[in-house]
Image: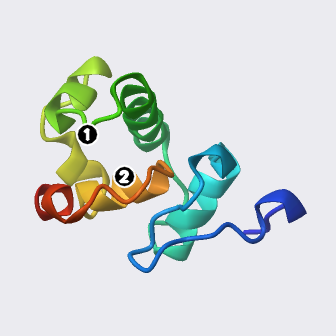
Amino acid sequence: MSMSKQTLSPNFDLDGFLCDMERWNEELARWIAAMDGLGELDDDQLAVVKELRQSYLRTGATPALSHVCRLHGLDPDCMTQLFPSAREAWRIAGLPNPGEEAKAYL
């Protein structure tokens, strides 16, 4: 998967989270997923990633993951079906490192 020069060198912290949320775009999300071995994101995965971002941007907090799934008509446990972990979805969404406490339940 190729990336444009603008997204070629995103900065990630030591835990693999994007340092600057403003640098996120769908191309970067697809690149992160490919680099992490998930392959191409499908429509449900991309919808969940976008909703995670929107919810975080609205509230500044980690949303209830089951709520994000239900918003898209998916099973409340969709995170475990669509991603290896909720942490992975958070990372693909380009959200900042949520901290140790939140990472424990992501």
Look at 42% across and 58% down and name the residue there: 91
Front residue of 103/52: it is 103
Task: Give the amino acid type for the residue marked by disc 1 in the picture.
Answer: Thr
* Disc 2 residue type (three-letter): Trp
Q: Give the quarter of the figure containing the C terminus.
A: bottom left
Whether tag 1 and tag 2 are in contact, CB under 8 A, the answer is yes
Q: Is residue 41 left or right of residue 87?
A: right
**Residue that carries the numbered disc 2 in the rendered image:** 90
SS label for mark 2 = helix
Crowd rating for badge 1 (residues with CA inside 10 Å; few <14, some 14–19, many 20+): some
- Left or right of 42: which side holds 11? right
Give the left or right position of residue 13, taking residue 89 as reference. right
The image shows residue 62, relative to residue 16, as above or below, that is above
Q: Earlier in the sequence, mark 1 or mark 2?
A: 1
- Please report the residue visible at 45 percent of the width from the left and 32 percent of the height from the top: 47
Q: Which residue is mark 1?
A: 62
